[in-house]
Amino acid sequence: MASVRGNSGNTYDLARGLRLYEGEAPLAERAAVLWRHLAPAEMDLARAFWNRYRQSDEVKESISDEKIEELAGRILPYLRDKFERIASPQWVATARLYVEKALAANVRLSTMLAGVAAETEAGFAALRASRPEGEDLHNLLRTLSDVEMMEIDVFVHHAMVITRAEVDAKQASQADSFNQKVLGVVRPPPASA
């Protein structure tokens, strides 16, 4: 999946990302409507993310059920922003912080994406439990899927930018080291007095 990059290559192009998922109405409008239906289950969505996340072998510290509650509570502002204000860059910036922290802890992006999938599954369950079958439910489920795909694109974009910067820094350091060695060989020895 290609990431939606801005002109600098480091900034997620939010406007373009939103346009990719326009359906019957703009995604920002549909996501805000969707959140009115999901808000009562917000802790279920947040718990689902962390429950799946903690299953990863990459997560070195055990995460207790009490810690899940704490972590779930911490991501609620992010979840609310992602749905209620998906056109705002705030949630995209928060997503970058989450990706940075995970990568710094040697947790792969796939672990985070598994958490996003679990969160979305919890959203599907909440919608199906609260809405009758029909066109309205179908539209809400489609919007939930669109929000998930956009979040995945944001996470992938950030991971690529972070990884690319790390690789560039390592290559620059290696090139500098090589250049210093070459200069040491080709420089004439200092003149003796």
Image (cartoon, rainbow, N blue to C red):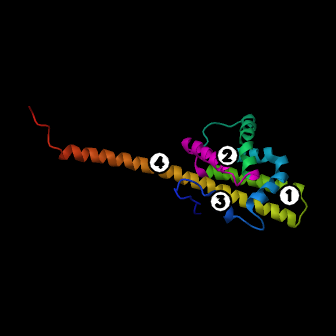
* Magenta segment: 83-109
SS for tag 3? helix
Q: Looking at numbered disc 4 in the image, what kind of residue is underneath it?
A: Glu
Q: Looking at numbered disc 3 in the image, what kind of residue is underneath it?
A: Ala
Label 2 environment density (alpha carbons within 10 Å; few <14, some 14–19, many ≥20): many
Q: Looking at numbered disc 1 in the image, what kind of residue is underneath it?
A: Arg
Question: Which comes before the other along the chain, label 3 or label 4?
Answer: 3
Report the mark closest to the observer, 3 or 4.
Answer: 3
Q: How far apart are marks 3 and 4 (CA)?
A: 27 Å
Question: Which comes before the other along the chain, label 2 or label 1?
Answer: 2
Do the residues bearing badges 2 and 1 touch, measured as CB atoms within 8 Å?
Answer: no
For residue 51, the mark is none
SS for tag 1? helix
Report the mark closest to the observer, 4 or 1.
Answer: 4
Residue 80 falls inside the magenta stretch: no
SS for tag 4? helix
Q: Name the residue under label 4.
A: 166
What residue is at 37 percent from the left and 45 percent from the top?
173
Give the x, y percent position of residue 137.
85, 62
For residue 15, the mark is 3
Give the x, y percent position of residue 189.
14, 39
Do the residues bearing badges 1 and 3 touch, measured as CB atoms within 8 Å?
Answer: no
Report the mark closest to the observer, 2 or 1.
Answer: 1
